[in-house]
Image (cartoon, rainbow, N blue to C red):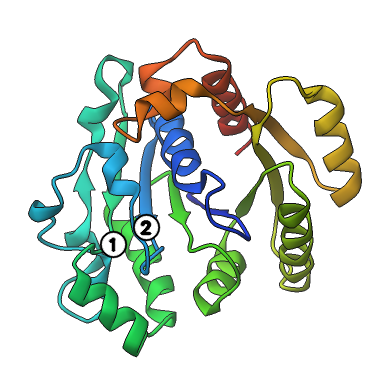
Amino acid sequence: MSKIISIHSYRGGTGKSNTTANLAASLACVGKRVGIVDTDLPSPGIHVLFGFDESKLNKTLNDFLWGRCPAQEAAYDVTSTLGEAATSGSALYLIPASVRINDISKILREGYDVELLNDGFQDLVEHLQLDYLFIDTHPGLSEETLLSLTISDLVILILRPDQQDFQGTAVTIDVARKLNVQKLLLLVNKALPEFDFDELQKKIANTFQIEVGGVLPESTDIIRLASSGIFCLNFPDHQISKVYRHVASLI
């Protein structure tokens, strides 16, 4: 049975898109059919991790939302980015959002029919025969976010070990529980290497009463990669990649 997974954070800059791409790639590498939708329409960017030439994005999620094409026509097969890590059955698709300034301005000015998103998600799952569909959400709480939380089989909340993130995550969890979200999982990112990761994981799990899938350290390797590829494919034996694979096993 297909699963829809939303990757969300209350604040920007938590590494949400990197996490989405890495978890999706980790599952695709073990033979799953996986899709990623970039619903961060005001500030899209996950396509960069897959090496997309922005000028060649002929169809995007925006075109579907504006009635210009079916959702599956905005899906790009990016399985080749897995390289030798791909196995039998591996398939990875990306449905990017438009980076054209006019399109972003139109979204900000006019909005869109949020209910169409759910129809689009279901069409993608059916037409692409997906095992998993990942939704890379816009940070914070909005109508789109609430829909994504409601229809997801799993919501992964990304937070940094920072008081503002703690407070914002608490608000998001409260909203998710009121919406009867099926399952929540926390993932801590950008923890300083000198932290005791086990203690940090226990503290956050106890604070929010939610399972913590892992703690990712602040990494110069990620900074050096500069969004030029999927981390777990470029550094398969890195501790960060091991955390991503562990979280993928929990999905």
**Front-most of 216 and 96?**
216
For the question of whether residue 63 can be seen, the reply is no
Q: Quadrant of residue 212?
A: top right
Q: Quadrant of residue 95?
A: bottom left
Extreme residue toward the top, this view:
237
Question: Looking at the image, which residue is at 54% across and 24% down?
Answer: 219
Extreme residue toward the bottom, this view:
110
Badge 1 local density, few (<14 within 10 Å), some, or many (20+)? many
**Front-most of 74 and 204?**
204
Which residue is tagged 2? Answer: 38
**Front-most of 222 and 127?**
222
Distance in Å between CA atoms under marks 1 and 2: 6 Å
Under mark 1, the amino acid is: Ala
Which label is found at residue 97? 1
Under mark 2, the amino acid is: Asp
Q: State the image coordinates of residue 77 (x, y, percent, origin top left).
A: 20, 42
Q: Is residue 138 above or below residue 219?
A: below
**Front-most of 100 and 212?**
100
Q: Quadrant of residue 118?
A: bottom left
Question: Looking at the image, which residue is at 27% across and 66% down?
Answer: 61
Residues at circles 1 and 2 in contact by the CB criterion of under 8 Å:
yes
Q: State the image coordinates of residue 43 (x, y, percent, origin top left).
A: 37, 62
Q: Secondary structure at mark 1?
A: loop
Question: Looking at the image, which residue is at 50% across and 39% down?
Answer: 19
Question: Looking at the image, which residue is at 23% across and 81% down?
Answer: 66
Q: State the image coordinates of residue 46 (x, y, percent, origin top left).
A: 35, 48
For the question of whether residue 55 can be seen, the reply is yes
